[in-house]
Amino acid sequence: METVVGGEGNDEGKLEESAVQKSSSDLSSSKGIADPVVYKLVRVEGDGRLVPATDDEVMEVEGLLDDEKSELQSLTGSDQIVQTIFNESSLTGIPQIESSGLSQSENTEDTGKLNSRLEYIEEMLQKVKQEERLRLAYGSPDHSSAYVIVDSQCSDQHDKLPGVDKKLESEKTLQGNHTSVVPTLSGRHVSQSEVAGECSKSRDELREGGSSTCGIFNNSKPDFSIIKGEICLDKMSIKELHETFKATFGRETTVKDKQWLKRRIAMGLTNSCDVPNTSFIIRDNKLVKTGEEERSNSVYNILIEDPTVKAVIGDCDDSTIAIFSPTEDYQIVSDKRLRDSIDTNSGAEEASLEQRAAKRVRKPTKRYIEELSEAEFKECSGKTVTSAKYSGLGLMSQKTQARPARNSSLDGRNIITRLDSLGGFGVHVPCVSRVRRSRPRKNIMGLMKFHPDGEGMMVNLVEDALGVNGSHLDDGCGNKDLKTVSAPDQSLVLCIAESDIDKKDSAMDVIKVEQSLELKHVCSLANTTDGNIATVPTSKGGIRRKHHRAWSLAEVMKLVEGVARYGAGRWSEIKRLAFASYSYRTSVDLKDKWRNLLKASFAPTTADKGINSKKQAASMPIPAPVLVRVRELAEMHAQVPPSLGSNKLAKYGNGGRSVHETRSGYL
DNA sequence: ATTAGGG
DNA sequence: CCCTAAT
């Protein structure tokens, strides 16, 4: 039995012919509405599966119709743009075919033609039916039959539609020369003709080679070289591409990216030319739609020359195979359905505008979106970074404003896909998470770079904060850590410092709030990603640690202890054993810190008690006992601060108990 | 890879 | 903290 159902159309076209309702199918209601371009013919088989072969037919028909249109156009010499052709083709396409009695076709002029077409199609369907029966009888695979059908249809066509026939003839002869025609016509048109040519060629080949299973695959190959649609797109200017885009999708686009346009158009062509296979499965008397897509060979050929698209297509390969696969068709299809649904969910960006398209080209779309986002990201990050770099704090607000817009688009995905860690710089992260990741870094970077001695300032501020307003620290990110044990996140400190700066320097309260929020965010982010040390490319080309992580007392003490245990100089040891948990401290850091401690312990020790209250705040408040200990150790290991030397030691002496040791060490 | 020392 | 040199 044969059933004609409305398949998904190529929604893009916002053609208004509307109301072309499929008389036959209940399906139409759920699915296609007034889908202008493609209503597919579907033959529902016993198992409820759609037979792709019919799609091919449809495509064929479409192509032929297009051809006809083109023909007309050229004959008339009218300047009408491709779009016209397009719209018409979509209008005249399957829908009318399906509803033979349909009065919807507004084009009175075409009525006659339409009728003939419809007749033709009916006949064709009959043939298909026959073929199918034959096929079933012989047990031959679907695709072969499909092509056979197509073939017959074509031949049929020749008889019925003179114009088309003519066109086909020319197509055949010109096959290799399509390109020449291209330049004068819009991309869309070109593509169409290309496709058409492709179709005709396929047919021819099939005819010649017989309709064997491999025929299909063989077809795709030879044609490949002939197709030049891609090249055409390549040659187009942006403006032209825009036109083409509009013609293809029926809407304007502001995208300037050539690649994007090209791919988009290619996809559009894919959609419109190649009737996707919409599989329907019958369950409980209901038709369950399965979004299945397939690209015709011709389309493949067109697209294939674009690497990106190629890749995309590659993804869909299995589906194609599935369609052609005689046996496992159903399973694969259903599998694909699953994926499709998933994809649909994730690729939300353009869903609104091109839901249909998205569905049909889901895979491509998804990847596409990702690519887009990536590109966007690049742009964005570049801008943001620089701006932050040059304008510093003042820009924060602006940045925050700018961000949400694009964040939102990607957000959902971010959350889901995000796998990366803040880790290394230059690490390639395949997901879209960059947005989130980069942001905090950028902010900090901006700040850092803005201040001539960013780090020092930061530190000071931090310490300031710690010393002076210990209270407000809490709102930052739980700075207690600093004072207490962990200090796993000095970044916290940094955040605080930032907020401080803002509070002092910027009079804008609103922004202040915003900032603190942001900072908070940053903090949390930093927290989560703690394990990795954020690095930043320096002007010189090297990489530099992102934050100056102030040494917490706990750390210092650990350090001291470590030195006491393992000896100064065994930094790697200490690092490994005592600082295992502090991933951001390197052995070099330990060494440096020790050096500083040494210096500190020997030099100002004496004076600090009196005046240093302020200074202390600025620089790490290392308790005297610790310093003493440091000194002890230093002497034990015969480490004496070089310049500070024994002189000072001897001179100033030191608090009580270490004296003897000092002495001994000194002596 | 680690260490030491200078910047 | 970064960088380099020397181990």
Image (cartoon, coloured by chain):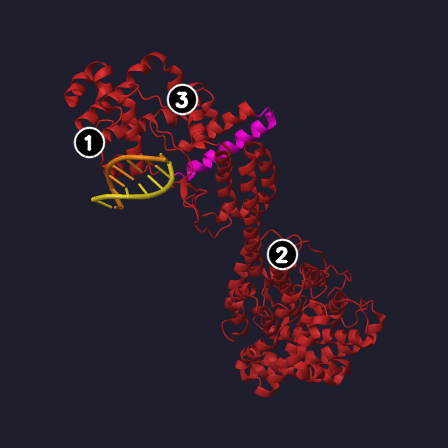
Chain colours: A red, B orange, C yellow
Q: Is residue A523 above or below residue A77?
A: above
Label 2 Cα neighbours within 10 Å, binned few <14 / some 14-19 / many ≥20: few
Q: Nearer the viewer, residue A173 or A47?
A: A173
Residue with the mark numbered 3 = A618
Residue with the mark numbered 1 = A565
Q: Judge whether residue A241 can be spotted in this image.
A: yes
Location of residue A77 in the rendering, given as x and y in whole percent from the top left corner: 81, 74
| Quadrant including the N terminus of chain A | bottom right
Looking at the rendered structure, the kind of residue marked 1 is: Arg
Q: Earlier in the sequence, mark 3 or mark 2?
A: 2
Location of residue A306 in the rendering, given as x and y in whole percent from the top left corner: 57, 66
Location of residue A81 in the rendering, given as x and y in whole percent from the top left corner: 77, 66
Cα gap from disc 3 to disc 2, whole angstroms: 52 Å
Q: Range of the magenta residues?
A: A506-531
In the image, residue A507 lies in the stretch drawn in magenta: yes
Cβ–Cβ below 8 Å for labels 2 and 1?
no
Q: Secondary structure at mark 3?
A: helix
Q: Earlier in the sequence, mark 1 or mark 3?
A: 1
Q: Earlier in the sequence, mark 2 or mark 1?
A: 2
Cβ–Cβ below 8 Å for labels 1 and 3?
no
